[in-house]
Amino acid sequence: MAFFNKPKYSTVSVKSRDGVPKGVWTKCPETGDMVFAKELKKNLMVVPSSGYHFPLPAPDRIVSLLDEGTFEEHDHDLKSSDPLDFKGVASYKDKLEQNRKKTKLEDAVVCGTGKIGGHDLSIAVMDFRFLGGSMGSVVGEKITRVIERGLDRKIPVVVVSASGGARMYEGILSLMQMAKTSAA
């Protein structure tokens, strides 16, 4: 009677798709539709058929918001350190380095000045890809400087927030940044 006990599942071998280079197509997690990567980028990382929003990296958001060629980055040299010598599965220093390589950013925020419609402004754009956009002492300092720069020059301040909250690796130092940026 083994003939009637047919297995419910069978293994199917699939040929490798070596003909399609990586990064040419992106799959929509909502509908499963395949979207041409260039089309997705042109549409600011929004899937045309479903309206699903992929994360938009900070540099791409700056390009989409500001007048072409007007962005001047400030405080790029400020870098997070490990003031508490945080130990975990991976050290905080290692996590920072991994995120710098992955995102090609120094921290979770890119700050500077630019123009929208010919009008000067001071801008901070957070990037969730860098440690969940969490706010550590350097992110707080950079955002505070953006606000102070706007006040000093009497220009508008734009902050595009994408934060996951305080950065646990810096303890109370990161919690203080919320008060610091609010006070600015």
Image (spheres, rainbow, N blue to C red):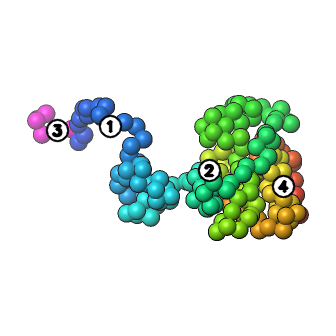
Among numbered discs 3 and 4, the one appearing first in the sequence: 3
Say which mark, if any, is on residue 145: 4
Residue at (87% x, 47% y) in the render: 173
Q: Residue 116, position in %: x, y?
A: 66, 66
Do labels 1 and 4 touch, CB within 8 Å?
no
- Mark 1 lies on residue: 20
Say which mark, if any, is on residue 5: 3
In this orientation, which residue lies closer to the viewer: 24 or 122?
122
Could you say which quadrant of the image residue 12 lies in?
A: top left
> What is the distance, in whole Å, between disc 2 and disc 1 at their CAs?
27 Å
Residue 161 appears anywhere in the view: no
> What is the distance, in whole Å, between disc 2 and disc 3 at their CAs?
58 Å
Q: Residue 24, position in %: x, y?
A: 39, 43
> What is the distance, in whole Å, between disc 3 and disc 1 at their CAs?
40 Å
Q: How many marks?
A: 4
> What is the distance, in whole Å, between disc 3 and disc 4 at their CAs?
71 Å
Which kind of residue does numbered mark 2 sit on? Pro
- Mark 2 residue element: helix
- Mark 3 residue element: loop
Can residue 49 be found in the magenta stretch?
A: no
In this orientation, which residue lies closer to the viewer: 153 or 21?
153
- Mark 4 residue element: helix
Which kind of residue does numbered mark 3 sit on? Asn
Say which mark, if any, is on residue 59: 2
In this orientation, which residue lies closer to the viewer: 55 or 36?
36
- Mark 1 residue element: loop
In this orientation, which residue lies closer to the viewer: 22 or 15?
22
Among numbered discs 2 and 1, the one appearing first in the sequence: 1
Residue at (77% x, 49% y) in the render: 74
Do labels 3 and 4 touch, CB within 8 Å?
no
Q: Which residues are magenta?
A: 1-7
